[in-house]
Image (cartoon, grey):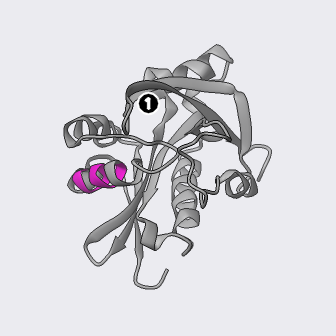
Amino acid sequence: MKGIEIQRVSGQAVLPFLDAVADLRIAVFREFPYLYDGDREYERAYLKVYARSAKSVIVLALEGERVVGASTGLPMSESDAGFRKPFEDAGYPLPQIFYFGESVLLPEYRGRGIGKAFFEGREAHARAQGYRWTTFCAVERAADDPRRPLEYRPLDGFWAARGYTFRPDLFAAFPWKEMGKGECENILRFWLRDWNESV
């Protein structure tokens, strides 16, 4: 990660970085598998939850003063109701779950260990606050989706190596505007790590 600084901010300290994170989300999530046709106004409103939460975290990858990547998290109890519901329905205690939001990194900075640093930063933040579970979700796409680039490689192996278990029974449905298609509902399935079983 030569030339890259990893910095962790929480609560109100995230405010100066929200526009940069919004721009990264718009740029990176245009790619497969999300194919998200985003806009700055929505992004600003969406990201404000991280400033409102005293226990939130954003792990930043900085090249000088430029934000080239970011990874977010907050208590599941403070996340969107659509993310909370599958865990509530399955009987999980929400106050013991920390939810990892997005990890977005510009393409030219990938393959340099920054993704690992993103996980380590968020996990350290969650563990320091005593959370038992950390979790995140990923959009579901068909293996034969014609929009899938030939060079695309899913991150399942990376996530499993970090101790996360794919939980197809835990899923959320969210609509967003897709590139060239307009508003579409998408299924996101969760990966979960129980730190009581992996420490």
* Residue 127 visible in the shown view: yes
Task: Judge left or right: residue 189 versus residue 48.
Answer: right
At 54% across and 48% down in the image, what residue appears? 126
Task: Tell me where residue 122 appears, x and y as whole percent.
Answer: 52, 54
Task: Tell me where residue 145 appears, x and y as whole percent.
Answer: 60, 39
Q: Nearer the viewer, residue 83 or 171?
A: 171
Amino acid on which the number 1 mark rests in the picture: Ser
Residue under pointer 1: 79
Q: Secondary structure at mark 1?
A: loop
Can you say whether 79 is above or below 144 in the image?
Answer: above
Category of crowding for the residue at label 1, using alpha-carbon neighbours closer than 10 angstroms: few (below 14), some (14–19), many (at least 20): some
Can you say whether 2 is above or below 87 in the image?
Answer: below
At 34% across and 41% down in the image, what residue appears? 50
Magenta residues, start to end:
19-25
Task: Tell me where residue 20 appears, x and y as whole percent.
Answer: 26, 57
* Residue 132 visible in the shown view: no
Task: Tell me where residue 72 appears, x and y as whole percent.
Answer: 43, 49
At 35% across and 38% down in the image, what residue appears? 53
